Amino acid sequence: MGVEIRESPVSDSDFEQMKRFVHDYLEASVEKEEEGGRMRWYPWHSADYRFNHILNVTDLATFIAEREGANSDVTRVAALFHDIAKLEADQDVHAEEGARVARQYLETQTDYPESFIEQVCQAVRDHSYQGDLADVPLEARCLMEADLLDKVGANGTTLMLLRMGYEARTHMDANEMVARVLERGEDAVSRVVSDTAESIAHQRIKRVRWFKEWLESEVSGMEELETEFGPE
């Protein structure tokens, strides 16, 4: 159920200031990391990639929230902060740490109502929840659905292919990597609740299937992988 606040407390200038804070926080997290830290190997463990992921999720979450009747301000602010601690905290606690950073920022840099701040922080805390998305508040659900969707489709495929280069794999392994994106997409479809998110997921999965078919038809000697994904 959405929050009761209906007048938007978040101005465009407020939101731009938040974006600068999140970007700078991620950059500082990398600078503090000891040499050889976990974000150094793959580019998606960098501040630039993490910030781009955050912006993708923010756009998607806001889109879903507007169509599903959620409070879009709560959703987009939570989305902006959801991975702010990803580069400095362990995976299993990064959501709680992100909520702590979000609360500290919102309480010291804004004059938003406590009810708004709590809704934002709850969504940030909830976003790594692995259970039924129907069990979390609507704003958190929109964020979680967007987080799942960013790893599906063209973006997810590109990241998988980029990963191949860092693992010194050849293009002959591409079919396997693209199949992983399809698996991720099917997992997203099985978890999302809203009609909006499900529609986006199916559209993105269809594009990946097309790419996989083209890959199999154009690369000589590429063996088709057996997958559970048949035509829609």
Image (tube, rainbow, N blue to C red):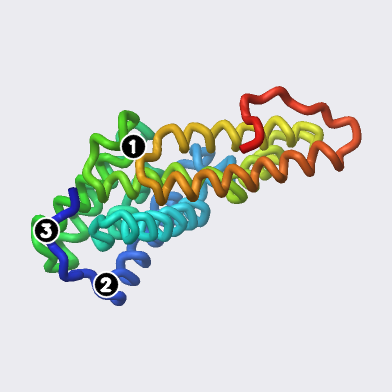
Q: CA distance from mark 1 to mark 3?
A: 24 Å
Look at the picture and state if 97 lies above or below 131.
below
Which of label 3 and label 2 is nearer to you? Answer: 3
Q: CA distance from mark 2 to mark 1?
A: 26 Å
Q: Is residue 116 above or below residue 9?
A: above
The quadrant in which residue 208 appears is top right
Task: Tell me if 81 is positioned left or right of 171 in this view.
Answer: left
Q: Is residue 92 above or below residue 47?
A: above
Secondary structure, mark 2, is helix
Pick whichever, 116 or 28, lies toward us. Answer: 116
- Pinpoint residue 78: horizontal percent, then vertical percent: 28, 54
Q: Amino acid at mark 2?
A: Asp
Give the quarter of the image for residue 125: top left
Q: What mark, if any, has residue 4 been given in the picture?
A: 3
Q: Amino acid at mark 1?
A: Ser
Mark closest to the chain's N terminus, 2 or 1: 2
Q: Residues within 10 Å of mark 2 (few under 14, many from 20)?
A: few
Is residue 33 at least partly visible in the picture? no
Q: Where residue 102 sits in the image (x, y, percent)?
A: 24, 53
Check disc 3 and give the amino acid type: Glu
For marks 1 and 3 on the same chain, the one whose residue lies earlier in the sequence: 3
**Which residue is labeled 1 in the image?**
128
Mark 1, secondary structure of its residue: loop
**Residue where numbered disc 2 is placed:** 14
Q: Which residue lies most toward the right here?
A: 220
- Report the mark closest to the observer, 1 or 3: 3
